[in-house]
Amino acid sequence: MTLPLDPSASLPGPVSDIEYFIDCPTGTVEHYFADDTYHWSDGVYRIHGYERGDVVPTLKLGMSHFDPADRDAVQAFWTKVTTTGGPSSVYASLRDLHGNTRKVLISADLILEDNEPIGVWALVVDLTRSIHLDRHQLANEAVAASALRRAVIEQAKGILMGRAGLTAADAFARISSHSQHTNRKVVVIAQEIIDRAVTLTRQDPDGARGRALQDLLRAL
């Protein structure tokens, strides 16, 4: 999914691209088709208000935390990635165990083994605090624009994490380093990663993922 963003637009205010994306809480979800099991990282437990061991992760549990207005969209997103692959992203509101509303971005793709899908891997990013800070600094239009920039960057990070096994910090470091070396905005580099991954997968859905990974890493 390519998000509706003009990457060439200037980010308003004095805050740089990099400063916007450092401190968002993140976590990962892995779903394996063979035994229908879900694995949450510690970060995903915390985003939902739990600690590891408090609950057994399931699709039903995860869906129950989403705002009812967003639940159908999240379900459709998960079904799409499960059946046709990604990369794809969805932005939604969820309510944690303590009743706190969180704004999250989920970026997902298939887990491959010998180029065959065996599950789904997702990056979950809690944007709540960052959006709250934006609202104290920027006009509403600028808040929306900066949220879209975050969404693009987090989706690109998710692609690199899912396909290259990088950590969130390493994925962002690769993107931001390439941004500095080429003197282009972080969000422009991120959008190019998303576009390349989507294009290569569409061109050869059965065999492109391995080549897409190599092309993405060579570009960085």
Image (cartoon, rainbow, N blue to C red):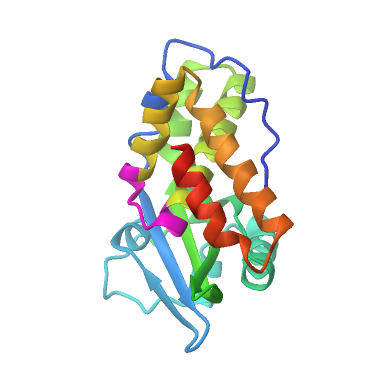
Task: Give the side of residue 220 with respect to residue 196, left or right.
Answer: left
Asked whether residue 104 appears in the rendered view, the answer is no
Q: Position of residue 39 (x, y in %)?
A: 38, 73
Q: Position of residue 45 (x, y in %)?
A: 34, 63
Relative to 50, say whether 17 is above or below.
above
Task: Give the side of residue 15 with respect to residue 73, left or right.
Answer: left
Task: Give the side of residue 6 with respect to residue 151, left or right.
Answer: right
Q: Which residues are magenta?
A: 161-170
Q: Residue at x 67, y 43 (%)?
A: 2
Q: Residue at x 37, y 60 (%)?
A: 44
Relative to 15, say whether 99 is above or below.
below
Secondary structure mostly taken by the magenta-highlighted segment of the chain: helix
Asked whether residue 92 appears in the rendered view, the answer is yes
Q: Residue at x 44, y 25 (%)?
A: 179
Depth check: 75 or 179 in front?
Answer: 179
Q: In the displayed orientation, state which residue is furthest to the bottom.
A: 35
- Number of marks: 0
Q: Residue at x 55, y 68 (%)?
A: 63
Q: Position of residue 53 (x, y in %)?
A: 26, 75
